[in-house]
């Protein structure tokens, strides 16, 4: 319930770019823990619904493509801000310039993606 609900990667606690198998494994593992039949908590059913929705988004190639585009755009914006005009989107995450960042590159990408997803959601609601 503490994860950012608009980002299915956060809900399932899997890294951006993970495989379909990783998504299914994480869904199965978490669903066994919070299934409403096994986990009696006032928000248990809501948590399970969020988990199902996240798995559905990441299993559907078109919906996953939209989320991946946001994540990729976030990564590009972070690299541009960190490395300036000489950046390349093909820089791997284990590049020496990116390894010792505080906060880490993954955290920065998730934060930027969160900002973008919130902005998109507000635009939809208007």
Image (cartoon, rainbow, N blue to C red):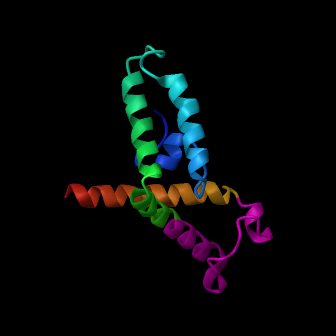
Name the image quarter holding the C terminus: bottom left
Q: Is residue 41 above or below residue 102?
A: above
Label total for image: 0
Q: Is residue 72 above or below residue 86?
A: above
Decide if residue 7 is in sight here.
Answer: no
What residue is rendered at 70% in x and 57% in y? 102
Looking at the image, the residue that sits furthest to the bottom is 86
Image x and y of residue 90, in percent: 66, 77
Decide if residue 83 is in sight here.
Answer: yes
Image x and y of residue 84, in percent: 62, 81
Image x and y of residue 73, in percent: 50, 70
Looking at the image, the residue that sits furthest to the right is 96
What residue is rendered at 66% in x and 86% in y? 86
Quadrant for residue 119, please give it. bottom left
Q: Main secondary structure of the magenta part?
A: helix
Q: Nearer the viewer, residue 64 or 79?
A: 64
* 55 lies left or right of 97: left
Looking at the image, the residue that sits furthest to the left is 126
What residue is rendered at 49% in x and 40% in y? 3
Quadrant for residue 37, please give it. top left
Q: Nearer the viewer, residue 61 or 126?
A: 61
Q: Nearer the viewer, residue 65 or 6?
A: 65
Q: Is residue 10 magenta?
A: no
Image x and y of residue 69, in percent: 46, 66
Q: Is residue 123 above or below residue 55?
A: below
Q: Is residue 107 above or below residue 99?
A: above
Highlighted magenta segment, given as a residue range? 72-101
């Amino acid at each position: 319930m503490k994860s950012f609900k608009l980002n299915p990667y956060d809900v399932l606690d899997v890294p951006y770019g993970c495989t379909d198998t990783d998504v299914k494994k994480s869904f199965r593992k978490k669903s066994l823990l919070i299934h409403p039949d096994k986990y009696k908590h006032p928000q248990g059913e809501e948590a399970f619904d969020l988990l199902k929705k996240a798995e559905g988004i990441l299993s559907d190639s078109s919906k996953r493509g939209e989320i991946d585009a946001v994540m990729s755009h976030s990564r590009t914006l972070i690299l541009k801000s960190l490395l300036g005009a000489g950046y390349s989107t093909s820089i791997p995450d284990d590049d020496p310039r990116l390894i010792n960042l505080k906060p880490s590159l993954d955290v920065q990408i998730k934060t930027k993606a969160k900002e973008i997803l919130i902005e998109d959601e507000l635009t939809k609601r208007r």
